[in-house]
Image (spheres, helix red, strand yellow):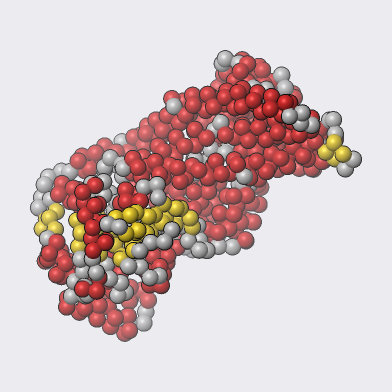
Amino acid sequence: MSASLSVALTGNPNTGKSTIFNELTGARQKIGNWPGVTVDKKVGYVRHNDKDIMIVDLPGTYSINARSPEEKIVIDYLLTTHTDLVVDVVDSSNIERNLYLTLQLLEQGIPLIIDLNMQDEAEKRGIKIDVKKLEAYLGYPVLLTIARDGKSLKNMLNVFTSISMEGYGASPQLKAHIARVQAIEAEVRDEKERQAQLIELRYEFIDSILKESVEFSHVGTTTSEKIDKVLANGVLAIPAFLAIMYAVFQITFEWIGQPIADALDEFIAGDVTEAVAAGLESLEVADWMQSLVLDGIVGGVGSVIVFVPLIFILFFCLSFLDGTGYMARVAFVMDPIMRRAGLTGKGVMPLMMGFGCGVPSIMGARALDSEKDRMLSIFAAPFLTCGAKLPIMALFAAMFFPDNAANVVFAMYVVGVVMAIVSTKLLSHTTFKDDNSTFLLELPPYRMPDMKTVLLETWDKGKGYLVKAGTIIFLGCVIIWFLGAFNGEGMVEDMSDSFLASIGAAVGALFTFHGFGTWEAGAAAISGILAKESVVSTIGILYGLPDVSAEAEDAVETAEVMLQTGMGSAFTPLSALAFMVFSQLYTPCVTALGTIKKEAGSWKWMIFAAVYMFVLAWVVSLLVYQVGSLLGF
């Protein structure tokens, strides 16, 4: 879409920048990636005063030192791309820290509209900003907004369509500051000393800005401070965090998500399957094609689609919590614990995403402050129980541990977390031991999240699961069905004579001492590298699992029905547990591996992750089976 006006939004994280973007553009936005990196590129459009306005939401960043992908994207875009207007969104309630980025941008000669957002929060904190004095002191226009207030955003659009930046330029005070910055950059050769002097100089100038144009008054204890006395309390913080996450998982897997998933499962296994079967029969489609469509595609992809409600609800809960400002507190509270594992508290936030999907969790590592933290987080994320692994755990737990299914699934989550910590600790003392970590974090005020932003983020993060189900998993189901239906002589009646059996037997031999050294288990493990959800769809194809939702009313009856299949005789409870542990820990799917390659920057790290995780999974699952056997289980 062509636009007559282009606007770039920049600013620190948690300033309401993305809320402004979402409120202005709504559904008229596209999400992609910046060239060469996996950082989100958000572009939206809005029409106002007969002008089509293109708005680019640049990544949130605290500075433009080009140390992280976000910082490099922001400065490269603003210096090399023609943009009519650049809007620096500032959190008015935390103006001192936010003006650091503003000053860096002005030092680069980038003309800005300075948007003082979150005016309501500033007033609650007793902060009063004189817009005219601030404009005069810097030489550039200043706006006042509240991100979710339609009136202030309409005023912002009016400014966009009427303002001309040609009438603005650096004030005498700003010019003098820039001259001092340039002198330091020219005279001081030592990088660390130069940066230290620049930081000191910038904050001296920010202090002068505040003295000239900002009035602070004491208003007593704020609401956020009162809440933090409980949620960020040294004693209560961890129990509160665990209670909140327990509620999130109950909402996802018990109260809301699971009933919807069960209803969807019944619909696909019943109405959809029956309709497709009837349609194929009426068209007199060949038996082999009917088998492909019903057993391979509908059965395989359908077994994955039923978990979509769980994925979306989990992402919604996490996005909602992030929007309240609570997730920043989690990072602060968890910092001492995370440091023992080799990470900082910020590492909690991307890892939390791993419970939904490993890909955004790996991508989220780019927000961390040091290369060490980024790499450790990248290698830790795939160990967690993502939504794609959940079907495996749910299936095996229901079949082999019907009376303790929830506890066994929870135990798999614990196994993933423990191995992520162990792996991080190991790598922080070996591969990345010489790289020091820093921890810079602001605590935004608590607020009610903007629901439009929460819903858009939920859709943006969750749609990848749907896309994967319709592409990679669809293709995988077709491939698995074909390999299971044919050999070198043609179509087979018994799947044990197929290509898939030969390939699976070679892989299954690796698990001879794990209790699941069958060709079916080997084939399922192979398919799991394509997509972890494919383990369940492959098992469904190989063992012909029944529609248990239509035949069983409770967990015990479900297990009895499913144990009557070939899968019931192929595994014992102990070998099933070992298989669950292996599935929890081994090589991530190809999508995650590709993301690791992009984020870590080389094929070497991708191959390392694939081999490293497979070996750890092989060893741990072997120990589970062998120790369990010695103990008489």
Residue 347 position (above or below residue 243): below
Residue at 51 percent of width and 51 percent of height? 362
Query: Which image quadrant is residue 135 in?
Result: bottom left
Furthest toward the bottom, the residue is: 187
Asked whether, in this view, residue 303 is left or right of residue 360, the answer is right
Of 220 and 60, which appears nearest the observer? Answer: 60
Q: Is residue 47 visible to the viewer in this orientation of the structure? A: yes
Query: Which image quadrant is residue 478 in?
Result: top right
Residue 389 position (above or below residue 136): above
Residue 274 position (above or below residue 196): above
Asked whether, in this view, residue 210 is left or right of residue 185, the answer is left
Which quadrant, please, contains the N terminus? bottom left
x and y percent of residue 434 in the render? 49, 63
Residue 269 position (above or below residue 21): above
Of 317 and 398, which appears nearest the observer? Answer: 317
Furthest toward the front, the residue is: 50
Residue at 36 percent of width and 82 percent of height? 189
Of 552 and 111, which appears nearest the observer? Answer: 111
Which quadrant, please, contains the C terminus? top right
Q: Is residue 401 visible to the viewer in this orientation of the structure? A: no
x and y percent of residue 458 in the render? 43, 42
Residue at 52 percent of width and 28 percent of height? 261
Count of numbered marks: 0
x and y percent of residue 559 in the render? 63, 19
x and y percent of residue 291 in the render? 75, 31
Residue at 36 percent of width and 37 percent of height? 241
